[in-house]
Image (spheres, helix red, strand yellow):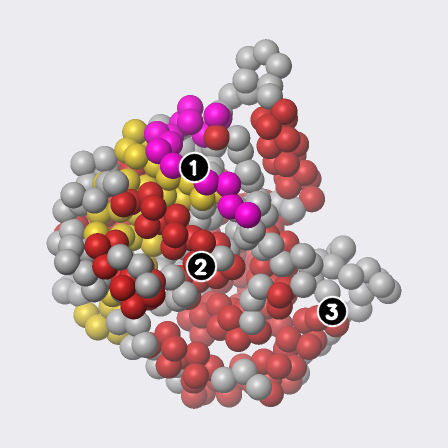
């Protein structure tokens, strides 16, 4: 099947059904004055759902999403939805941007313009990119995998084939965060002849403890991981072991879906415990709606199961690697440790921002992407 154009056009019946479900929501109780300690705060979620019911305009957000050229390609039997915007400059560099969970391709909407048309944004047209933003398999408007094995290396393979076989880019750059960072780094490891360089804003490491006394930076990082595993990784264990069981609830209840996703946006962003200091309500709800209208929360969570049960061996990346490390990221390892696994050519400790870098700090992320790839362009 050839690449075909795609336009988002959600049936009105889906939106009517959503309104009915929101209106009939059954709210749980919560411990008095507990804030967010037990999970998503009741008062905040009720306010967000009230806005969802009365003021949120999906058709306006749909129009925003459709302002980017979208396509679907069948790659080795898997349908991949993606944005593809050609750069405005003398020699645009192809760049693949990969998102993670619980995000979506929508995360990139603020960076696509500056990356593809730098001249319009006051930068050098020589730094233009052809930008490709896929929805991960099982996410959003991509197809839902029907067989086991859709793990990070498999997605990297599909994205490489999308770029080379379907779009005709023999060599390209890649960037990503969350699952997108793993996909990006795997692209560099598996396909070095096709990758000019890889850039990430999250740094997954698979390293043995340092022999002797670890540095203060390594001790801090390992304690950071310990705290996250103890207090913040319950979602990952559930999604990595019983995603189907959870899917029934989240696919049935839009309020439950919102609560599950919003909890992560608050916990992982540099929002100082105030979500709407960083994200607008429309941004939060548009991301949630992409999961709701496509019914992909279950298939998106299966990526955790596939990864948990893949028994993947440690790997190294030799292609040039760039890192933008945002202070509120889940894991902030020392550069020295990352250098054991990756060929670090640029490492920048950012002044603000968290896990959802393209939404939280788009200007800073664009600057880092431009700076890293500037010396790698052919």
Mark found first going from the N terminus, 1 or 3: 3
Mark found first going from the N terminus, 2 or 3: 3
Whole-percent x and y of residue 267?
63, 54
Q: Which residue is mark 1?
A: 347
Say whether marks 1 and 3 touch (CB < 8 Å).
no
Separation of marks 1 and 3 at Cα, in angstroms: 40 Å
Magenta stretch bounds: 336-351
Foreground label between 1 and 3: 1
87 horizontally vs 50: left or right: left
The quadrant of the image that shows the N terminus is: bottom left
The label shown at residue 362 is: 2
Say whether marks 1 and 2 touch (CB < 8 Å).
no
Q: Secondary structure at mark 2?
A: helix
Whole-percent x and y of residue 322?
37, 39
Separation of marks 2 and 3 at Cα, in angstroms: 30 Å
Q: Secondary structure at mark 3?
A: helix
Q: Which residue is mark 3?
A: 42
């Amino acid at each position: 099947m050839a690449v075909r154009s795609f336009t988002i056009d959600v049936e009105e019946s889906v939106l009517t059904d959503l309104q009915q479900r929101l209106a009939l929501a059954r709210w749980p109780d919560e411990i008095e004055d507990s804030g967010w300690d037990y999970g998503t705060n009741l008062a905040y979620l009720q306010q967000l759902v009230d806005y969802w019911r009365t003021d949120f305009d999906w058709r306006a957000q749909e129009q925003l999403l459709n302002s980017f050229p979208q396509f679907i390609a069948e790659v080795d039997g898997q349908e991949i939805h993606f944005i593809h915007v050609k750069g405005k400059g003398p020699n645009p560099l192809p760049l693949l941007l990969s998102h993670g969970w619980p995000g979506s391709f929508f995360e990139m909407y603020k960076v696509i313009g500056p990356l593809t048309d730098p001249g319009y944004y006051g930068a050098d047209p020589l730094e233009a990119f052809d930008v490709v933003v896929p929805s991960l398999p099982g996410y959003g408007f991509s197809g839902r995998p029907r067989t086991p094995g859709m793990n990070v290396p498999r997605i990297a393979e599909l994205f490489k084939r999308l770029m080379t076989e379907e779009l005709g880019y023999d060599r390209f750059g890649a960037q990503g965060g969350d699952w997108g960072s793993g996909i990006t780094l795997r692209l560099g490891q598996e396909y070095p002849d096709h990758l000019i360089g890889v850039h990430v804003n999250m740094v997954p490491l698979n390293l043995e403890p340092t022999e002797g006394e670890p540095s203060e930076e390594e001790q801090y990082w390992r304690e950071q991981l310990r705290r996250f595993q103890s207090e913040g990784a319950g979602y990952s264990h559930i999604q990595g072991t019983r995603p189907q069981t959870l899917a029934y609830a989240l696919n049935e209840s839009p309020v439950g879906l919102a609560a599950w996703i919003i909890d992560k946006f608050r916990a992982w962003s540099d929002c100082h415990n105030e979500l709407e200091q960083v994200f607008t309500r429309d941004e939060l709800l548009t991301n949630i709606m992409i999961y709701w209208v496509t019914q992909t929360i279950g298939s998106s969570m299966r990526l955790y199961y596939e990864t948990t049960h893949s028994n993947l061996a440690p790997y190294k990346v030799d292609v040039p690697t760039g890192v933008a490390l945002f202070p509120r990221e889940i894991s902030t390892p020392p550069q020295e440790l990352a250098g054991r696994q990756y060929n670090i050519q640029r490492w920048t400790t950012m002044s603000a921002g968290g896990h959802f870098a393209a939404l939280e700090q788009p200007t800073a992320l664009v600057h880092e992407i431009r700076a890293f790839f500037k010396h790698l362009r052919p």
